[in-house]
Amino acid sequence: MHFISGQYRIFSIFNLLFIGFLSLLCIAPLVHILAVSFSGAAAASANLVKFWPLDFTVEAYAQTLGNDNFLRALWNGISRTVAGTLVSMLVMVLAAYSLSKENSEFRGRTFYMWFFVFTMLLHAGLVPTYIVIQKLGLINTLWALVLPHAVNVFNMILLMNFFKVSVPKALEEAAYMDGAGHFRTVFSIYLPISLPAIATVSLFTMVWHWNSWFDGLIYITEAKRYPLSTFLQTVIVQQDMNQLNLDPADMEIMSNRTVKASQIFIGALPILLVYPFLQRYFVKGLVMGSVKE
């Protein structure tokens, strides 16, 4: 037993060191971006900045937060993320509740389940989707970014399995006996009990909407309507410097690179602030949602 205990201790130490190393690899790029954003133009342009600012200055953040294009894109990104998460969670919770029932309770349950799985395996394609959105008059609107992604089947299945495992049948039957309908049961019984799964899927959905940039390029033709992720893609990848609105006088104390770094860090900040509040539900929600089909 002592030999096994020693092996387990060595294994645990190795795991901690390995996980710590991976954590540093994940954090290092963000720390580097933060250091660049606070550095002077010469040091940033010469690629001298590593993990600590050189010639410390906050001018890049002053320029970024004074850029109307960036602030507008930030608001568009927040609006898209909030609306997309709310719509997706409402639709997926109702669908997961229905599909968590047995065939005897929900006729056609098997057909709808296969229908959802089929949409997860096969996609209509970019061109047909664009035509549908165009015919519905959604081009250049928030709903063009929200409605096509309202249902993520994988997340819906996580919720469905969590409902099956975690909600006692007796509790649901007691609610029906007290006169509660399906909607009352969902919002008064299922949601409070399933908070870990709801938080996990909400985080998945939130991160996806916040980081998604490609659909903004396709469905949004006016730059002023770009969400933040699409705005950053045009500035950083496509090198569209018109979006930066830099004053030539300001270029003496900062560079395009420092402004880009400040915008990237501000773009990552909302998710970094939200995640700690949902982290305690994250692992439990994943594990519980994968126990039962």
Image (spheres, grey):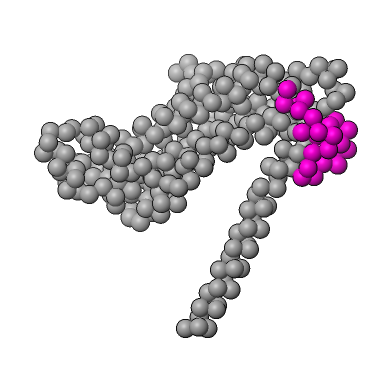
Q: Residue at the spot x=57%, y=39% of the render? A: 272
Q: Is residue 137 left or right of residue 169?
A: right
Is residue 133 among what the camera can see?
Answer: no
Q: Residue at the spot x=68%, y=52% of the render? A: 25
The stretch in magenta equals 38-62
Q: Residue at the spot x=73%, y=22% of the render? A: 62
* Image position of 233 with respect to 199: above or below: above
Where in the figure is residue 284, as x and y percent of width and height? 41, 51
Where in the figure is residue 174, as x and y percent of width and height? 14, 42
Q: Is residue 113 left or right of residue 129?
A: left
Magenta residues: mostly which secondary structure? loop
Where in the figure is residue 258, as x and y percent of width and height? 78, 31
Q: Nearer the viewer, residue 59 or 249?
A: 59
Residue 201 position by quadrant? top left
Where in the figure is residue 134, as x and y percent of width and height? 50, 19
* Image position of 24 with respect to 88: above or below: below
